[in-house]
Structures are given as C-alpha cells and as structure tokens.
Amino acid sequence: MKSLILAMSFFMAASGGKLKDDPKKDENLRTITGKATYYASYFQGRRTSSGARYSNQKYTAAHRTLPFGTEVTVTNLANGKSVVVTVNDRGPFNKRFIIDISQIAAKDIGIYRKGIGDVEISYRLPATAAAAADSVAVN
C-alpha cells in the first residue's frame, strides 16, 4: 500500500499535480501573426465576395483563403485587445497584410488611427478542412 501511495504521489508531482492528462489540445486551432488593416469608408454598402453588403458597423473581415463564415479572433499585439470577426470577403490583396477588418473592429482593438497594426489571428477550421490543410503542408 505504501508503494502505491508513493507511486501515485510521484506521478502527481511529475504531472503537475493532475492525475488525468490535460484535455486534448484543439488540433483544428490555427494561429498566425502579421499585419492587419481595415476597410476604407469607400466600401460602405458595396457587395463583398460572399454577396453580403459591407457595413463598417459589423464585425466582419476579408481573408484570402478562409471559408466564408469562419470566426476569427484578431488580437492587437501592441495592447492585447481582441475582437471576433466573421470572414465574408476576399482579401487583402497586398501580401503585407494577413487580414482586412471592418472599421468598428479596428476601432475596438486600437488600430483605426494608425491604419495598420501587428496582430495575431486565431481560428478553428472544420475537421475536414484541417485534415486537407495538414496534408497540403506535408506534401
């Protein structure tokens, strides 16, 4: 019995005090850092690539490859502020930027006045899209 208690206490110390493994990491979560910009007022009311009309008061974004409807968390690396936007357009077409966000989203995370900002974007891919992305990355 003493050896069992000793073995369990050793295991708990080695595992950080938890008997169970940490919950599964989300294998479909992707994180990318880069620069973001926002839509100019010129685009207000125009149709996006998804067919929806752009509104500078909605939390939307343009991304070159993510499926429409993907929710993306955009975090300003300078101040830590985050916002969740929904992809409904294609872009940005300038390779320096990884995402275009709406004006309201840019104001919320503090990049509106500068026009651009260093950000981290994170999103979850559907399981089938994640498997396809991984197979492309391996090849």
Image (cartoon, grey):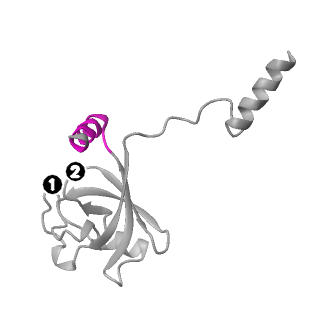
Q: Position of residue 8 (x, y in %)?
A: 76, 25
**Is residue 46 shown left or right of residue 121?**
left
The residues tagged by marks 2 and 1 sit, at their Cα atoms, a distance apart of 7 Å
| Residue at image coords 69%, 36% | 14
Which residue occupies the extreme top position in the image? 1
Q: Is residue 38 left or right of residue 7?
A: left
The quarter of the rendered structure image containing the C terminus is top left
Which quadrant holds the N terminus? top right
Mark 2 neighbour density, 10 Å: few (under 14) some (14–19) many (20 or more): some
- The quarter of the picture where residue 84 lies is bottom left
Q: Residue at x 31, y 71 (%)?
A: 35
In front of the other: 135 or 75? 135
In this picture, is 11 found above or below 89? Answer: above
Residue 133 or residue 111, whichever sits in front: 133
The quadrant where residue 36 appears: bottom left
Q: Position of residue 118 (x, y in %)?
A: 37, 72
| Quarter of the rendering containing residue 126 | top left
Question: What label does residue 83 carry, if any?
Answer: none
Q: Amino acid at mark 1?
A: Ser
Q: Image check: 127 left or right of 93?
A: right
Identify the residue at image location x=12%, y=63%.
47
Q: Residues within 10 Å of mark 1 (few under 14, many from 20)?
A: few
Q: Which residue is mark 1?
A: 50
Instruction: Indicate which disc, 2 or 1, sits on the residue closer to the N terminus.
Output: 1
Task: From this view, report whether residue 47 is shown above or below residue 136.
Answer: below
Segment colored magenta: 125-137
| Mark sitting on residue 68 | 2
